[in-house]
Amino acid sequence: MTSYLIKSLLCSGLLLLFYHLFLEKEKMFFFNRFYLLFSIIFVLGIPFLRIELNPEKLPDEVHPYAQTDFLKTDILPVKIPDQTTYKEEQNDSAHDLPRLIYSLITCILLVRFLINLHSVLLQKHGKQMIRYKKTMLVLVPENTITYTFLNHIFVNKDEFLNRQIPEEILTHEYAHVRQKHTLDVLFTELVQVFFWFNPFFFYFKKAMRLNHEFLADEAALAIAQDPGSYKILLLDKILSGTRTNLTSSFNYSITKKRLTMMTRTANPSQNLIKQTVSFFLILGLGFTFCEKIYSQKTEANPEEKPAKTRTELKTGNGLSQELLNEFTETIKKHTRYTKEKQPYNEIYELTAEQKERLFYLYSNMSSEQQKGSIIDIYQSAIPVKKIRSAELFEKWKNPNVFGVWLNGKKINNKELGNYKYTDIVESEIHNLYGAAKKGRIYKYQLELTTNDFFDKTYPERMKDRVHIRQRIVRK
């Protein structure tokens, strides 16, 4: 959820900033309408968009210690160290508080929206209607400004019958009907109802309404005698009547921007450049804010020889005595012993380069030399994102079965409710036994990684993929 908020806020802010700086002042109203509508849909959907990428491959051919390829195996599961104490979050009400606040505010805004919608629909009830072109004029007895909702234009009855409503006004409102501006208004209102936590949607709605007026003004100017008379007509209507937020009215947002736009001339070449830049901006933001899934795909090559097995690699003479001594001395020099009574009380303090060197030596030992080693060395596979099913994700929420660690931190199982199953891109389950199971109600330790944490730690994990553990001697 946090990732979605950050991505949607940043993306909407950048798109809105670009609109105000480069598009709003240009006379390309139809493109601007499409840009604003697409931007809202883009912001809502881009955090859910996923693209699949191939992870970077380690350049084995330039490995500092190897002249030939060496064995790469997945790290084997290790026993979970005993953790005697940890804090469980017990306050479920505190956990559900943000959800309750969101639901309450959303319900209030939705009720307000429905009340406004109902009040507009009631305006045409019992009123006289007259056909005007491909729409209907609703004659309102009360003193009201001219406004539009869906396929209806609401006008004052006395003014219309006395022919006091100029044709420019009706043409202006008919442009709202013909271009279906009400649908844009309803869409932006509903977006704001459910995504009220994003303040940029309010400014998107405001920009959309102003652009509607630019479009309607352009239609009215096409039949007006001159722009000056139309401006005077606008100013004469400023102080009359009231309207609701769901309608398009003749005197909406009479600002300097709107009056100035009437006399502005279009620059086709400049408009084309800005439209092209906006396309690449959306493309760039799409790649930046979408969810990236790393996958390993190998293509079968019939000419390739079968990979050598572990046994085949371990035949032969193996390492020289000098290299065996280097291997043994490196382990002794960088091993620290703990006093805790655990199966593994050795701690190997080595750099990533030293681990790579030991892994190379270990991989080129003979079978007999490896049997004589006191340690096992493994190299983990390249980290790859893998999303589990929604059904399995729901099972993870059961605290009687799973103890959950998210991004290395113990969490309450209910906190998974803040995430979607697609947010989790790595999962590893350990079966608890012995001392590790003592005092715990769950049977499995579940280690999960979110998409953001995966991306953040991926470079470091790629640098250090070699793991060393003491060999268990079975008697």
Image: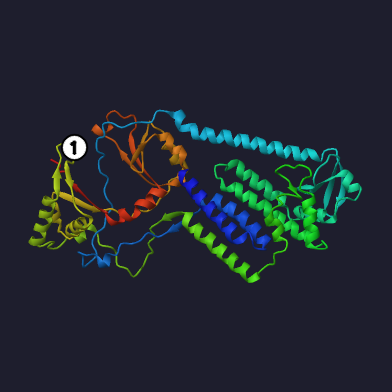
Q: Is residue 97 left or right of residue 242?
A: left
In what quadrant of the picture does the C terminus appear? Answer: top left
Pick whichever, 131 or 437, lies toward us: 131
For the rendered model, the colour scheme is rainbow
Q: Can you name the residue that lies furthest to the right here?
A: 162
- Three-letter amino acid code at disc 1? Gln
Q: Could you tell me which secondary element the residue under label 1 belongs to?
A: loop
Location of residue 404 in the rendering, given as x and y in whole percent from the top left corner: 36, 37
Q: Of 117 and 77, which appears nearest the observer?
A: 117
- Which residue has dot 1 on it? 342
Quadrant assignment, res 474: top left
Residue 94 at what x, y percent from top left? 45, 30
Q: Position of residue 96 (x, y in %)?
A: 48, 32
Q: Is residue 417 visible?
A: yes
Residue 368 lies in what quarter of the image? bottom left
- Confirm whether residue 381 shows in the render: no
220 or 350, nearer to the observer: 220
Residue shown at 12% from the left, 61% from the top: 319
- Residue drawn where x is 24% and y is 32% of the image: 435
Task: Decide if residue 121 is on the left or right side of residue 300.
Answer: right
Q: Is residue 259 left or right of residue 108?
A: right
Number of numbered discs visible in the structure rendering: 1
Q: Residue at x 73, y 55 (%)?
A: 179
Task: Mark 1: give few (<14), some (14-19) or many (20+) Cα within 10 Å.
Answer: few
The foreground one among 253 and 431 is: 253
Q: Position of residue 297 (x, y in %)?
A: 39, 60
